[in-house]
Amino acid sequence: MTQDDSILIEQFEGKIRKLADLYNTVKSNNSELLSQIQAKDLEIARLNQELAGLKESYQYLKQSKVLEVSGHDIDDTKRRVSGLVREIDHCIKLLNV
């Protein structure tokens, strides 16, 4: 083996070590990114549950506003309640069919 062959082998070994180091770095970064994705997925699931709860609360609030009675809105409120009762009766009839 000549001097040039030895130099080429050393350069090749150096490049292989550098490539292995880069691989380990990328593998480490990939693991970190995957854990960040999992954390974000958990946060998204939690926020979706919170959103569902807030939507439900908003629906209840809207329904309570429909039934809100003030001095000059009594007739309007009676009409709304009558409409709700008719709608409930209609739903009951559909369930009985």
Image (spheres, rainbow, N blue to C red):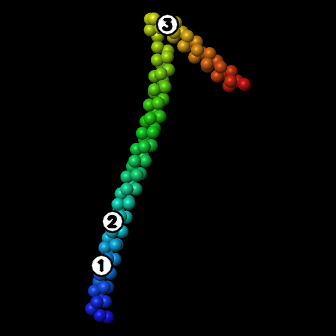
- Which residue corresponds to mark 2? 25
Mark 3 neighbour density, 10 Å: few (under 14) some (14–19) many (20 or more):
few
Which image quarter is the C terminus in?
Answer: top right
The one of 14 and 28 positioned closer to us in this rendering? 14
Mark 2 neighbour density, 10 Å: few (under 14) some (14–19) many (20 or more):
few
Kind of residue at badge 3: Ile
Local SS, label 3: helix
Residue 78 in the image, given as x and y percentages of width and height:
54, 9
Residue drawn at the location 32% of the way across and 85% of the way down: 9
Kind of residue at badge 1: Gly
Residue 81 in the image, given as x and y percentages of width and height:
55, 13
Number of callouts: 3
Q: Nearer the viewer, mark 3 or mark 1?
A: 1
- Which residue corresponds to mark 1? 14
Local SS, label 1: helix
Tell me: residue 86, above or below residue 95: above
The furthest residue to the bottom = 1
Tell me: residue 51, above or below residue 84: below
Kind of residue at badge 2: Thr
